[in-house]
Every structure is written in C-alpha cells, then in structure tokens.
C-alpha cells in the first residue's frame, strides 16, 4: 500500500518542478527580447526625430547673438 500514497505525494513535487521549468523558460525568452530591444540600432525615423529635437532645443537655449550674428562676413 505504500505505492498509491507515494504517488499522491509526488505529484505536487512534479508540478513544482514543471512550474519552475516553465518559469525559467519564460524568463529566458523575456530576457532575450529585452536584450535584443536594448541593443538594436536606432531607426531612420528615430534619428530624424532626435535631430529635429536638437535643432528645436537650440532656439530655446542659444543666445540671440549666436543665432543671429550682428555682422555677416562675405566676399565678392
């Protein structure tokens, strides 16, 4: 009679091991997705948006004399 009693006690252990394996697999897939997202190069649209933001920031932070100099040099 030790057989059925041993089987009843072992299924929670098997379920726990299976849960641990599934959890590790999900963590590995999620970690891989995060790594690939954080290590990718920026797209052309992202570069363009960053450049536009940098130009817009200049108008707020640069003094007027730097944007519009008082004299312009030229040659004929």
Image (cartoon, rainbow, N blue to C red):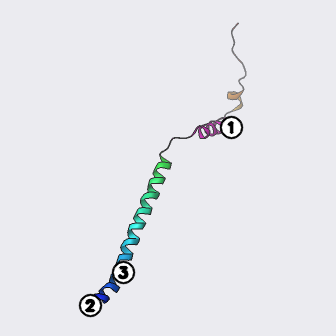
Label 1 sits on a secondary structure element that is helix
Q: Is residue 60 magenta?
A: yes
How crowded pointer 2 is (Cα within 10 Å; few <14, some 14-19, many 20+) is rated as few
Q: CA distance from mark 2 to mark 1?
A: 78 Å
Q: Position of residue 38 (x, y in %)?
A: 49, 48
Q: Residue 25 occupies which quadrant of the picture?
A: bottom left
**Pointers 2 and 1 in contact (CB under 8 A)?**
no
Label 2 sits on a secondary structure element that is helix
Q: CA distance from mark 3 to mark 1?
A: 64 Å
Judged left or right of residue 2, residue 52 is right
- The secondary structure that most of the magenta stretch takes on is helix
How crowded pointer 1 is (Cα within 10 Å; few <14, some 14-19, many 20+) is rated as few
Q: Residue at x 40, y 64 (%)?
A: 24
Q: Earlier in the sequence, mark 2 or mark 1?
A: 2
Screen quadrant of the N terminus: bottom left
Q: Residue 27 occupies which quadrant of the picture?
A: bottom left
Residue behind mark 2:
2
Judged left or right of residue 59, residue 41 is left
Q: Position of residue 18 (x, y in %)?
A: 38, 71
Query: Which segment did they paint magenta?
Result: 41-62
Residue 56 shows which numbered tag? 1
Q: Position of residue 4 (x, y in %)?
A: 31, 88
How crowded pointer 3 is (Cα within 10 Å; few <14, some 14-19, many 20+) is rated as few
Label 3 sits on a secondary structure element that is helix
Residue behind mark 3:
11
């Amino acid at each position: 009679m030790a057989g059925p009693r041993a089987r009843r006690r072992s299924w929670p252990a098997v379920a726990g091991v299976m849960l641990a394996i599934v959890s590790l697999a999900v963590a590995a897939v999620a970690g891989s997705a995060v790594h690939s997202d954080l290590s990718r190069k920026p797209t052309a649209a992202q570069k363009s948006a960053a450049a536009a933001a940098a130009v817009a920031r200049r108008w707020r932070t640069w003094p007027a004399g730097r944007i519009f100099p008082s004299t312009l040099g030229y040659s004929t």
